[in-house]
Amino acid sequence: MPPMYPFVKRFFDIVISILVLLVILPLLFLVGIVLSLSGEREVFYFQERVGWKNQLFSMWKFATMLKNSPEMKGGIITADRDPRVTKVGAYLRKTKINELPQIINVILGDMSLVGPRPVVSKAFAEYPETIKSLIYNVRPGVTGIGSVIFRNEAVLIGKVKQMGKDPWEFYKNEIYPYKGQLESWYQEKQSFATDFFILILTVWVLFFPGSTLHYRVFPTLPRQELFQSILQIS
């Protein structure tokens, strides 16, 4: 990692986030009006996540699910066509518009534009100790290599449920170990170039969710073929 990388990255996080916030402000305002008039009539959802230096913080999102969803059947895991997701929320989640308020977290210093995705405490507890001590030595990101690879995570979990498997056990035994490998890779490969390509790939998979371009851009990425084989199940 270049010596000045953390300081320059933080500078660009602030500048770019302020500019993006100014540009998307009309969209945020419009979404806020729609949410306040539909579904649960809640605009924002604040969820406690594990972040920088393993400290807890409140992550901003647009509200997309029924109130108290984590206490309902399904818990913290959201599958494809989850009945707890509102009609408006389904569109916001599909387009990732629900994640846009995290720009505020970036400005506040809770997050970065690119980094490991922050998780809830229950999920963090499933990481091996080696990953726990490493993963949030940098600020968590609005996007990251895990976000790119798991663009179809809700669909994947839906397929797992169709196969009669327990989603939480699948998370613990398959998804979290792999995410730990991915974030370890990111810690080793941190650079402006890596962050730039992750941002580009984040936009790319919005339009081509089944793409594996990331493995060609980053040939040293850890692979997990199991997920691709499950997604191919009709």
Image: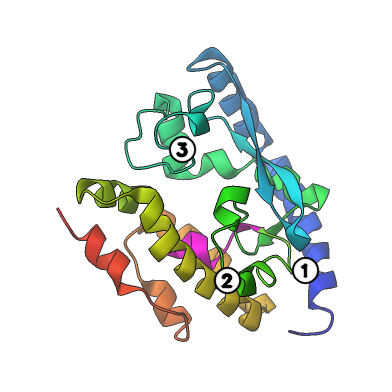
Q: Nearer the viewer, residue 134 or 60?
A: 134
Figure quadrant of the N terminus: bottom right
What is the x, y in percent for residue 45? 62, 31
Residue drawn at x 50%, y 45% as measured from the top left: 96
What is the three-letter code of the residue carrying label 3?
Gly
Proximity of marks 1 and 2: CB atoms separated by less than 8 Å: no
Reply yes or no: does residue 142 show up in magenta. Answer: yes
Q: Residue furthest top?
A: 37
What is the x, y in percent for residue 109? 81, 53
234 versus 116 height, above or below: above
Can you tell which of label 1 and label 3 is closer to the viewer? 3
Q: Give me the C-alpha separation between circle 1 and circle 2.
A: 18 Å
Looking at the rendered structure, the secondary structure element under dot 1 is helix
In the visual, does 65 lie left or right of 20? left
Mark 1 and mark 2 lie on one chain; the one further toward the N terminus is 1
Proximity of marks 2 and 3: CB atoms separated by less than 8 Å: no
**In which quarter of the view is residue 83 placed?**
top left
Q: How many marks?
A: 3
Residue under pointer 3: 75
Proximity of marks 1 and 3: CB atoms separated by less than 8 Å: no
Looking at the rendered structure, the secondary structure element under dot 2 is helix
Residue drawn at x 57%, y 49% as measured from the top left: 122
Residue under pointer 2: 183
Can you tell which of label 1 and label 2 is closer to the viewer? 2
Residue under pointer 1: 9
154 versus 225 height, above or below: above
Looking at the rendered structure, the secondary structure element under dot 3 is loop
The colour style of the image is: rainbow
What is the three-letter code of the residue carrying label 1?
Lys
Mark 2 and mark 3 lie on one chain; the one further toward the N terminus is 3
Q: Nearer the viewer, residue 43 or 170?
A: 170
